[in-house]
Every structure is written in C-alpha cells, then in structure tokens.
Amino acid sequence: MASREETAAMKRALRLARYGKGNTFPNPMVGAVILDSGGNPAGDGFHRKCGAPHAEVVALASAGEDAREGTLVVTLEPCCHMGRTGPCTEEIIKSGIGRVVVAMEDPDPRMRGKGIQQLRDAGIDVETGVLSGEARELNRVYIHFQETSRSWVTLKMAMSLDGRIATPDGGSRWISCQDSRRLVHRKRGTVQAVMTGAGTVREDDPELTVRLVDTPPGGHPVRLVVTSSGDFGDSKKIFQGRTRVIVAAPEGLSERLSQLTERANVEIWEFPPDDRGRISLESLLKRTAEEGLGHIMVEAGSVLSTDLLRSKLVNSVCIFTAPKILGDGGRPAFGDLNISCMEEVSELKDVSCMSSGIDFLVEGEVVYRSD
Ligand SMILES: NC(=O)c1ccc[n+]([C@@H]2O[C@H](COP(=O)([O-])OP(=O)(O)OC[C@H]3O[C@@H](n4cnc5c(N)ncnc54)[C@H](OP(=O)(O)O)[C@@H]3O)[C@@H](O)[C@H]2O)c1
C-alpha cells in the first residue's frame, strides 16, 4: 500500500502533470516526484511538451544523488521503448531508485505493463493503482487516442430553454450571455482545434479565434470546417489571419476551393464521399489525431452536431442553457438521433452543473447505449 507521503506526492505529481496541458499530445501529460530514502521530497518534474524529456527523467535529474534508495512517484507507467527520447525504465534502474509508485498502466500497446515488469525484473518494488481515477481523468484525451486513434470531441452549444440554437432567420447572436461567451473563449484556448460546419460559416461568418480572454501562449487553435459543397457564401472571417484553417471536403471539390488554397494559412483535406456526398467524420477525426490535434471543440449547428452524435463520435458536451424561449420556429439543437425509447437515450457521466452569468452550464462525458 502507498504511504501517506507517497499519496501526497502523487497528488503533487498530478498537479505538475497539468502544466503540460495542450502541449504533450500525442504523448500523455505526466508528472513525477522523487522522495529520498527518508520519505522527504527530493525532486520533481513534468513532461513539458512532445519531444521534451519525460517527467521521470526530469525528476531524477533534479533529485541527483538523493534519488538513490528513494521512491519515484509517477502518474503513468514509465516507458520502456525507444521513442523521441530513450526508455525511462533504464534511467530509473540506473538511478538506484528502490521503489516506484505508479497511478496507472500506460494504454500504449507498446507498454501495457511491460515498463512495470521491467522495473520489477530489475528488483525494484513497484506499487500501482494509486489515485488511478484522477490519473485517468487527467489523460482522458490520450487514453481515448490510444484506444480509438481518434481525437477527443467536445460538443459545445448554446441553447434556449426550449432547446433552440437559432431563431427562424438563422440568428444565434447572442443566445448565451457575455459571461458564457467569455468562458467559451477560455475553453477554445485549451483545445487544439475548433470545428464547425459550412452551414454555420454561411450563416454566422464566425472567426472561431480566442478573443474576450488572453490569447493562449501556443496561439489560437486550428480552425476546422467541414463541407460537402464548398459553398461558404460571402463568409470570409474564418479564413482570415494567420491561424491555420483546415477545410475537410469530399474529393473532387478542388476547383471550387482553389481560391482558398491560394491563402497560405488554408489547407484542404479530401476524403472519399459517401452516397450522400458527405465525408466520414470518423476518418476526419483519425486524421486530426495523426496531426496532433488531440482535443477538438465543435461549435456547429444542428446538422454537424447531429451527425457526430449519431456516429457516436462526441466524447463530452458543454451545453449552455439561456433563460430565453425561442418557440417552435426556432432551429432545434439536434435532428433525429435514431432514438425511439428511453432505453436508447445516451446519458452523461461525471456531470457538472454550474451557473454561468444568467445561463446554466452542463458538462459531462457521453455514455452511448450499445447497439
Ligand atoms: N447556438 C449555438 O450554439 C450555435 C452554434 C453554431 C451554429 N449555430 C446556428 O446553427 C445554424 C446553422 O446550422 P447548420 O445545421 O446549417 O450548420 P452546421 O451543422 O454548422 O453545418 C452543416 C453543414 O456542415 C457540412 N457537413 C456536416 N456534416 C458533414 C459531413 N459528414 N461531410 C461533409 N460536410 C458535412 C455540410 O456542409 P454543406 O452545406 O457544404 O453541404 C452541412 O450542410 C445557424 O443559424 C447558426 O447560427 C448555433
């Protein structure tokens, strides 16, 4: 069992790991703390960004000789394979550490307990599962990527009390209050991409950049637009500026999109069309993950949001409900989700509810009913 000092060190390691948020993907966020042989803190570290030294190596370096016979407390199983950096298990064994406390196994197929086994084979005492729930929550984007090869999708929406996202003329500015909009901008700053559909681009001409709050140190998130027609009306704002824009479209639209490709910040990703001329959103989310866009926030209208939910590709939601009633003519948040009875309704887990100015914000992870 982990001692009180080790559990406290794990809490600290989890806090440290969060400093890497937004910069480590496709690697996980990892934090590590070294306790000396007397159980006193002797060093710590975290994985700053993909390609940078791993948390264990940073922590061992900061502890120096104090690591000998000490304990390494780390939020994820140390790696045992050669990646952009060398295997951490070798460094740990070389350091003379006597005990390793790990929160969770690494779901990377190259690992899955092999790192832990290597440490045990070298005579190191290894304890696992300490604060594993918190560690899984910390790395949910990474775990999802390891399990599905896809980006994590958060669906954000602002709706009225009667579940409408726009008035009959397509107006949605502003359903939510200023505080909620500021919160959305802050959330944009924590994801790698903001995704929308051509319908929203035509109707709203959105910028989808981070404003209302400080620009994140890593810059604005990538803007990702899905279209089957290549028709963006007169909208321009989303393509302006230097922030990268990805237009995901079916093959064969190159001519229609040629004006856009003249812009240095815009790139077109083509996918084979299905029989409705649409692209596979699953393929798109695999490509975004390959490109290092681990967490995507969707800010779209009903068509794209419904498509994503029906395809079970939404991982979490962030829904603002405003004290407004738009009535029957207002545009509903979602179309047909193929649900005919309560048993088929998807639910949320780990739900949080809070006020946001005069709105109400519900967030949670989607649990799909299996087919
Ligand atoms: N309140 C809110 O939170 C909120 C947020 C965003 C938007 N809105 C409102 O929503 C309305 C627009 O709704 P909408 O449903 O038309 O917009 P949307 O869902 O943003 O965009 C729909 C379009 O996305 C493209 N698309 C979706 N799935 C695709 C796929 N699998 N493959 C290829 N293309 C795909 C299609 O583009 P093509 O047209 O090119 O075929 C489709 O017509 C506006 O009134 C806007 O103000 C409200």
Image: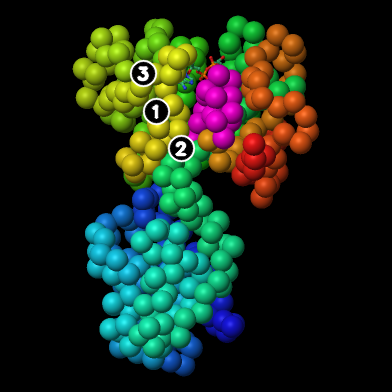
Q: Nearer the viewer, residue 119 or 261?
A: 119
Would you place residue 239 above or below residue 118 in this image?
A: above
The residue at the point 44 percent across, 26 percent down is 280
The residue at the point 47 percent across, 50 percent down is 147
Q: Marks 2 and 1, Cα distance to the nearest angstrom?
A: 9 Å
Callout 3, which amino acid? Pro
Q: Are marks 2 and 3 in contact (CB under 8 Å)?
A: no
Specify the segment rendered in magenta.
294-312
Name the colouring of the figure: rainbow
Q: Earlier in the sequence, mark 2 or mark 1?
A: 1
Q: Disc 2 designates what residue?
A: 296
Front disc: 2 or 3: 3
Q: Image quadrant for the C terminus?
A: top right
Q: Nearer the viewer, residue 192 or 186?
A: 192
Q: Are marks 2 and 1 in contact (CB under 8 Å)?
A: yes
- Helix, strand or loop at disc 2? strand
Q: Disc 1 designates what residue?
A: 224
Callout 1, which amino acid? Leu
Determine if residue 340 is in view: yes
Callout 2, which amino acid? Ile
